Amino acid sequence: MTDAPAQVVYSRPKSLTDTPMHYCPGCTHGVAHRLIAEVLDEMDLREKTIGVAPVGCSVFAYNYFDTDFVEAAHGRAPAMATGIKRVLPERIVFTYQGDGDLASIGMAEIMHAAARGENITVVFINNAIYGMTGGQMAPTTLPGQKTTSSPNGRDVEQSGFPIRMAEVLATMEGTGYSVRRSLHDPKNVRLAKKAIRMAFEVQRRGLGFAMVELLSTCPTNWGLTPQQSLKWIEDHMIPVFPLGDYKVSPAIAEIK
Amino acid sequence: MARELLEGNKAMAEAAIRAGVQAYFGYPITPQTELLEWMSMRMPELGRAFLQAESEVAAINMVYGAACTGERVMSSSSSPGVSLMMEGLSYIAGTELPVVLIDVVRGGPGLGNIAPSQGDYNQIVHGGGHGDYHPIVLAPSSVQEAIDLTVLSFDLAEKYRSIVIVLADGNIGQMMEPAELPPMRPPERQLPDWAVRGAEGRERRILSSIYLKPEEEEVTNLRLLERWQKIQENEVRYREYYLDDAEYVVLGFGTAGRVAFSAVRAARAEGLRVGLFRPISLSPLPYARMAELSKTAKVFLVVEMNTGQMLDDVLRAASGRIPVEFYGRLGGVVPFPDEILAEIQRIANDSLTVDGDPRQSWMKRMKEIINN
């Protein structure tokens, strides 16, 4: 026993409410939420931030962040964020979107937000499946991956190929920052947080459109245990969705 | 302010600016485009937000976001574009946000054409996006009225946290005539207590149209209905012309109402006791006043630039008390006053009954008109 006073080594970020999350056990939405909240705390942005929630499993994201929030129609979060940011350019506006939301129904909205260099931050959760509706094929579903709407595995002849959004968005001139990270182990979680921080920094400095794609788990709809799901990201998702920086504009590369 | 020669689309845009619109999002579509162009020139020079969106879907969702900040916001479009906006309009209604939309209606369905039409009456007044809600709908029949109703729209939208749609047509949008613009309103105004602008020194605010528990959605639907009933009590608007002794009442809104006015005056000159009832608020429609008129008039004649969309509502108001006749031109064709005059003469001379669908006899007459 020592006499040293107790120290707080871990606490809930101020930007996160103490509402119990509805996400399934082993789902990485909670991790992604926490990383965003930590970054907002560290950058002292909580009171300046307006979040835009998507349609999908994270439809209730607004319950978990202690910031102002709005709830968009499916895929339209970048358009809604644009409306807010254009009226309140000094505020921090971020969208939180899944793969169906961002890469399928909301493809036009995300591409044009990037093309305009809309000064917003986008956190993109890619788990290769539709979670909320119960495990259907997503635009990011892997070739051969079984889902409830591709029961024999995604047939690329019939349903095409997965879309690599970090790479696609990197081609847009208005994009300042487009990277892919993963949430499958502690090291990668730390790297994900650094990228999220950078994506908010880009907005704070007015350096264009910033997007962080996060490879995430869906144990429930993948039919795997949480542990197996983390391994599945590593073994199956990363080969199709390589981690990396797809665009870091020169002005952003200078930020330390 | 002096009267100037103004084009409808530009006049509505400038009226919105003077009413204090802080953000405009839109997409080019004929016959509305001049409104967007005017905004693209004027909004930036006033330090206000203008953005040409990638689609009407995006435009209305930008409006949705901007409306969440509590500022005055709007969009404008024409029929096919407004169809695309229906998703966003439903979300805006469900979130109870004040938004102004101008629909410069063109011929349809489908791509249709770019000529003036009133084919959007059902889409705007009765239809729209999914779920239970009612927008306020105002129909101008002149450039001056388009200006005045645009300004009024912002006030009504804020008063009721409601969508207000100015239902113009290609004729109102493209026509030039003398009109007077209002003075510029001072930009300062109290922001609403629900506005989402960052939780600085206060509790966070959330704006959403989601009520996952059916019981909560039920309460929300009821709240919207209560608000709608207040709107029905307070915001009915119409104009009456020569109705004091009228035996025959012509009913028409917007451009059809305006053309009908010329016909009514010509008929009066012939000694026919005919008047015009022109609804300005199509939603709420002046049901009570129409019902009252059906107790003193001999015949109603509904004139529209569609296949009788308001006609069904007039039939409901008249409740079979008197014959309701119909005359419409379709697909972007605007009726001439002479055509409506001939209809007035016909209803004054024919013996008419309340039975059947008035469209049937009109369709027979239409065949002759089209063949000539």
Image (tube, coloured by chain):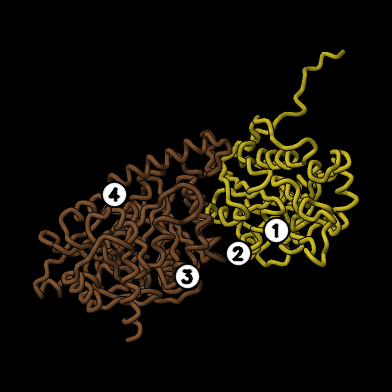
Chain colours: A yellow, B brown
Q: Sort mark 4 into few (<14), some (14-19) or many (20+) by Cα contacts within 10 Å.
A: some
Label 1 or label 3, whichever lies nearer to me, is: 3
**Amino acid at pointer 4:** Glu
Disc 3 element:
loop
**Marks 2 and 3, how far apart in space?**
33 Å
Q: Find residue B235 and name its label.
A: 4
Tell me the residue that label 2 is attached to.
A116
User: Quick check: B5 left or right of A20?
Assistant: left
Disc 2 element:
loop
Place residue A144 in its image quadrant: bottom right
Quadrant location of the C terminus of chain B in the rendered image: bottom left
Q: Position of residue B244 (x, y in %)?
A: 11, 59
Label 1 and label 2 in one chain: yes
**Amino acid at pointer 1:** Ala
**Amino acid at pointer 2:** Arg
Of pointers 1 and 2, the one earlier in the residue sequence:
1
Tell me the residue that label 3 is attached to.
B109
Quadrant location of the N terminus of chain B in the rendered image: bottom left
Q: Is residue B170 above or below residue A209?
A: below
Visible residue check, residue B183: no
Q: Find residue B22 and name its label.
A: none
- Callout 2 touching callout 4 (CB < 8 Å): no
Tell me the residue that label 1 is attached to.
A103
Q: Sort mark 2 into few (<14), some (14-19) or many (20+) by Cα contacts within 10 Å.
A: some
